Amino acid sequence: MPNWTPKTTSPVLTQRIPCWPFADPKGRRTIPLDEYTRTGGYTALRKAVETLTPEQVTEEVKKSVLRGRGGAGFPTGLKWTFLPKPDADGEGGVRYLAVNADESEPATFKDRLLMDFDPHLMLEGIALCCYACRIQTAYIYIRGEYHHQAMVLEKAIREAYAAGIFGTQGLLNGARTRNRDRAWAVECHVHRGAGAYICGEETGLLESLEGKRGWPRNKPPFPAIKGLFGRPTIINNVETLAHLPFIIGQGADAFMQQGCESTFKGAPPSYGTKLMGVSGHVNRPGCYECDLGIPLKVLIESKDYCNGMRNGKRFKGAIAGGISMGVLGPDQMDAEMDFDIGRKYNVLGLGTACPTVFDQDTDMVAVARNIARFFKHESCGQCTPCREGSGWLYQLMTRIEDGQGRTKDLDLALEIATSMGAMPGTTICGLADGNNWAIRTIMNKYRDEFEARVKPTFVPVKLSVGAGAR
Amino acid sequence: MPWITKPSGTMKVARRNEPYLTPEIRAGLERDILPRYEKKQGALLPTLHAVQHRWGWLPWQALEEIAAFLGLSPAEVWDTASFYEEYWLQPKGSTLIAVCRSIACECRDHTKVTEACKARLGIDVGDTTDDGKFTLVEVECLGSCDTAPVALFNHTLHENLTPEGVSKLIDGAAAGEHHH
Ligand SMILES: Cc1cc2nc3c(=O)[nH]c(=O)nc-3n(C[C@H](O)[C@H](O)[C@H](O)COP(=O)(O)O)c2cc1C
Ligand code: SF4
Ligand code: FES
């Protein structure tokens, strides 16, 4: 196993949620407001509104180089500075925060953990963001399938209103803030989606919030200038916001002690911890809080994490972090799980940092077919390369899986994949590019399996992805 | 594939006198939901959810009522409602079984779970049983990949499913065990 020791010895995001490697996840329960406050909750918010100006909060987040946990890894503080400058009176007009709780990327299950068990952590993050960005209204866009989590959030929000955290009187019962010595009022609402992956894309999300079909918008204009209902809007992921209480409470320096630097000169670092949900053929699948930079091998093999491959099987590959990122091949188990992973290991990026691990018996053609089906099903249909390409790829993958493929199908599939999203501007959003990376990396890293399938002598045996699973 | 439109020229609209957007639903929305949004259309998804929650699906007449309620054209409501998989534009069974078919669940043999459902209910994926009690669908990742395979029974998530386990759940639901 690679020689790697965690830098973070006590949990940050999972302080109140028992979670490996810090605590046995037995007996998880939703933390109510009184317990949250008793254990240090909302002190970061108080510190912010009473001692820091909105600009100082933004500065601290910028300094921490907190990078978005929703998939793209964009620096959060920097994103906030794209909002129009407030006027001399510190007013910025109507602005919105849209919290991205859509979590629909296959293999991803981390935001759910935060919302299920410690909803106030995210709510405090929302309040901090709204104060820093001078936002009056936050919408939590939660995927429709998370019925239970939506209810948990509704309850937590009611608690927060009753305690004077949100509401017209101003944050923390109308506390005088360092924003020109007046109260800052924030409203917070849950908005349930209705089963469409594309609404996780930030502008698809905005359209859906406006009551329309979730069709992503062309950019520019970027949401920070013209977003929800045409107003300046910030979109941040649940986990990103859940980091804010720590960064403001303990300071950016404490945050920068966690995670890792980039190994590329001048490239931005990967500070902080990250929730990594591991699924697939491992002994102990689950959601772990790890320093960014943990090698996948440690995550899989260490007793503190997944405790090895199931049934002692060999590692064959892993989805890097949500299926859109592509796969890490058999020789890439050492990959460090940080924001450099894309440049180093020929995948799209870190994504949601939630790997699905495949053992030696996995049929990678079936994996490609499953993934191609997902994208075909979820393409919103606006852009021709994505709508048509995703359908063709699915057809090709099924044909190859069934042993009906021709040798030239391999090149055809690669050509279609490469034409989707690789050329900037041919598609509106990143879904097509995710489709491209997923299919292309599987085909390139397991080319022999695909070739064997299209040989005329190939006899289909109908292995499933889960062959020998139970 | 939400972009495949359905033929509407031959559509027959069933109508009734009693509104689907009942005075209670209306009042609840006017009190709690409408004030949240700068434009009324923002309340469309919550309104569709509320009406579907009451009736189990969204008949065309309901869409018309919602359009009038929010000051939209029926076409705008249809446009949105038809895009999202969770809105049912035809009746569904009282228990909706949604088996996850994405990658982590396929790794853990979700197909056996689906097959067990099909065998137990005697229907195919996408169909509803004749008694109107069950509808079976397959959906994409439900965000519980560590406990794969998983399925939703209406709003309740069931984890680490086995073919036997899911059959038992169906037995329970058929015997009237309530699934929210
Ligand atoms: C097709 C597609 C789907 C996405 N789905 C999600 C999602 O479910 N949750 C999420 O937080 N971000 C998702 N994103 C990323 C968002 O567009 C956006 O980058 C993110 O919410 C920004 O928040 P962050 O900076 O805090 O990460 C998706 C992006 C694309 C292109
Ligand atoms: S790339 Fe695909 S999903 Fe994205 S907007 Fe275009 S068609 Fe829709
Ligand atoms: S793949 Fe089935 S829950 Fe994620």
Image (spheres, rainbow, N blue to C red):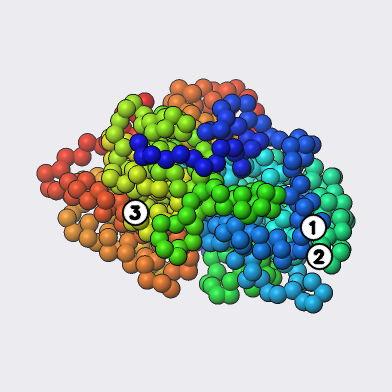
For the point 86% across and 55% down, the residue is A175
- Do pointers 3 and 2 mark residues of a single chain? yes
The residue lying toward the viewer, choosing from A345 and A162, is: A345
Which residue is under mark 1? A51
Quadrant housing residue A228: bottom right
Query: Who's the residue at 66% across and 59% down the image?
Result: A60
Depth check, front residue: A263 or B96: A263
In this orientation, does residue B36 appear?
no
User: Where residue A79 sits: x, y (%)?
Assistant: 60, 66
Residue A466 drawn at (x, y percent) = 34, 34
Q: Residue A259 in the image: x percent, y percent?
A: 51, 49
Three-letter code, disc 2: Asn
Q: Which residue is mark 3?
A: A345
The image shows residue A62, relative to residue B85, as above or below, that is below
3 and 2 marks in contact (CB < 8 Å): no
Q: Secondary structure at mark 1?
A: helix
| Left or right: A302 in relation to A452 | right
In the displayed structure, does residue A292 sit left or right of residue A436? right
**Three-letter code, disc 1:** Thr
Q: Residue at x 54, y 25 (%)?
A: B169
Q: CA distance from mark 2 to mark 1?
A: 10 Å
Near mark 2 (Cα within 10 A), the count class, few <14, some 14-19 or many ≥20, is many
Give the answer, above or below, for where B118 lies relative to A232: above
